[in-house]
Structure formats: C-alpha cells, structure tokens
C-alpha cells in the first residue's frame, strides 16, 4: 500500500499539475487557483487510502476535472464579467514543445475547445496514455484518440497561421 510522506509534500509536488488542469478548463487564473485550493481542501478533509502514487494522481485529476466543471456550471460564474486575466503563472512546463516557441504553443493550446485542451494537456504535458485519459475523463479510448488527432490538426493550423503572420 502507498504511504505518502506528508500532506504538505504531496500538495507541493502536485499543485502545478492540478493548477494546469484547472486552468485548461477555467481559462482564468483566479478560478484555476480557486479550483486548486478546493481540490487540496477535499484531499485534506477526507482520509483516503491510495494504492500508490498513480492512484493519488488519478484521484487528484478526476477531482480537479469535476470541481472545474462544477465551477463552470455555477450560476454565480455565469452572472459575472471577468476583469481580465494574466498568463498562467504555473504553466512553465508548457513553455516550449519540440522547438516551437512557448507563447505560441500555450496560446494555441488554450484556444482549443475544452474537450481537446484537456486531452492534449494530459497526453503531452502529464504523460498519460490514451487508455488512462479515457478512464480519467470517462470517455472511450476511440473518442480520446479522435480528440487528440483533431487537436493536433487544429494546433498545426493555428501555429502555421502564427508563423506565417510573423
């Protein structure tokens, strides 16, 4: 059985991943920070027994997705107008991919529809397999593969446009 060394270390280790996933759903750093805080509050409130590090990580991802979706459905959020946003401060892992400039890549990924953003983030930045993503997001493997293929095509088009504009 997996025994975590301390809640503080687990939070410190996983906070960037949780924030990035929340940001892909919320597209707003303040909301992503709120979601991150809520996820770790739930982790601290419930004494859960995890079978291993991967089980803990999967639980954190699933809770992050659920909390993010709940926030997006909330009546409060639908009645507010955002004042603006800044770039995701904790998304340094998205700074570059295969030599592609980081800001272009980050903007292109963030401009994708939610269902494509989430699979790209989990596949390329969190190193999950198609099967694991399908389980985490409760989608079929075929759907995840199709979404990855479509996301790649969209990203290719977006980045090609960016480079042609330069």
Image (cartoon, grey):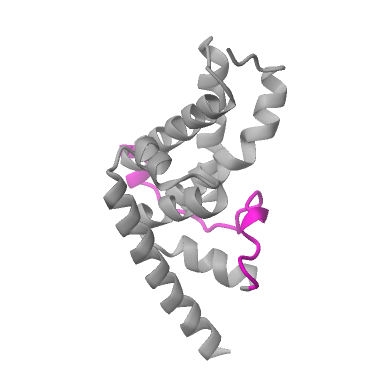
Q: Is residue 15 above or below residue 116?
A: above
Residue at (42% x, 56% y) in the render: 117
Q: The N terminus is located in which quarter?
A: top right
Q: Which secondary structure is most common in the magenta stretch? A: loop
Q: Position of residue 41 (x, y in %)?
A: 55, 22
Q: Is residue 140 above or below residue 47?
A: below
Q: Is residue 21 above or below residue 163?
A: above
Residue at (47% x, 27% y) in the render: 59
Q: How many marks?
A: 0
Residue at (44% x, 70% y) in the render: 155
| Residue 88 inside the magenta-drawn segment | yes
Q: Nearer the viewer, residue 83 or 49?
A: 49
Q: Position of residue 95 (x, y in %)?
A: 65, 62
In the displayed structure image, the side of residue 59 where residue 151 appears, left or right? left
| Residue 22 inside the magenta-drawn segment | no
In the displayed structure image, the side of residue 80 where residue 73 appears, left or right? left
Q: Nearer the viewer, residue 166 or 119?
A: 119
Residue at (50% x, 77% y) in the render: 159
Q: Which residues are magenta?
A: 74-99
Q: Position of residue 71 (x, y in %)?
A: 39, 38
Q: Position of residue 8 (x, y in %)?
A: 71, 22
In the displayed structure image, the side of residue 141 where residue 108 appears, left or right? right
Q: Nearer the viewer, residue 88 or 128?
A: 128
Q: The C terminus is located in which quarter?
A: bottom right
């Amino acid at each position: 059985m997996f025994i975590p060394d301390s809640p503080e270390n687990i939070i410190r280790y996983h906070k960037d991943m949780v924030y990035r996933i929340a940001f892909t759903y919320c597209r707003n750093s303040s909301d992503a920070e709120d979601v991150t805080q809520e996820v770790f509050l739930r982790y601290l409130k419930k004494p859960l027994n995890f079978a291993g590090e991967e089980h803990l990580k999967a639980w954190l991802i699933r809770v992050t997705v659920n909390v993010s979706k709940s926030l997006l459905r909330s009546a409060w959020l639908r009645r507010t107008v955002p004042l603006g946003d800044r770039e995701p401060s904790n998304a340094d892992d998205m700074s570059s991919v295969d030599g592609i400039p980081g800001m272009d890549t980050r903007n292109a990924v963030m401009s994708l529809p939610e269902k494509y953003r989430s699979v790209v983030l989990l596949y390329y930045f969190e190193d999950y397999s198609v099967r694991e993503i399908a389980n985490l997001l409760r989608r079929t493997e075929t759907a995840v593969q199709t979404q990855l293929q479509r996301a790649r095509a969209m990203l290719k088009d977006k980045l090609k446009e960016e480079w042609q504009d330069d």
